[in-house]
Amino acid sequence: MRRRRSAPDWPYALFGMIHATSKERVEEAVADIRDRTGLTDYRLLYSTKEYKKIRVRYFDPAYDAWAQAHLEPGDVPAQR
């Protein structure tokens, strides 16, 4: 496993993302993670711009049609 390089002004090598409807909800989630793990050395960075927002579609029939047209017997399709 390779470890992400850090920098003197940003010593963190592990990153995560929390999606929430408000800053308060993010802070509640972070507090829960902190309380469960005991981690206290962290920084929060908030997005300043939303670039694209598309609802994820699970089990889309279009995938099944694509798989039938493009996958051969024995191919391993993406896990669903």
Image (spheres, rainbow, N blue to C red):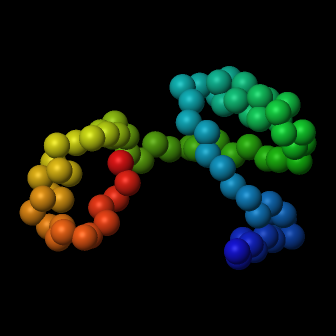
Q: At 69% across and 55% down in the image, what residue appears?
A: 15
Q: Tell whether 10 sits left or right of 73.
A: right
Q: At 85% across and 31% down in the image, what residue appears?
A: 35
> In this orientation, which residue lies closer to the viewer: 41 or 74?
74
58 lies above or below 72: above
Give coordinates of residue 30: x percent, y percent.
74, 34
Q: At 12% across and 59% down in the image, what residue appears?
A: 68
> In this orientation, which residue lies closer to the viewer: 22 or 77?
77
> In this orientation, which residue lies closer to the viewer: 31 or 57?
57
Give coordinates of residue 46: x percent, y percent.
64, 42
**Residue 27 visible, this angle:** no
> In this orientation, which residue lies closer to the viewer: 60 or 49?
60
**Residue 15 visible, this angle:** yes
Quarter location, residue 79? bottom left
Q: At 25% across and 70% down in the image, what residue appears?
A: 74
16 lies above or below 33: below
6 lies above or below 29: below
Give coordinates of residue 22: x percent, y percent.
59, 25
19 lies above or below 42: above
- Residue furthest to the front in view is 74
Give coordinates of residue 7: x percent, y percent.
81, 71
How many marks overall?
A: 0
Can you say which quadrant of the picture contains the N terminus? bottom right
Q: Tell whether 68 sits left or right of 39.
A: left
Quarter location, residue 78? bottom left
Quarter location, residue 37? top right
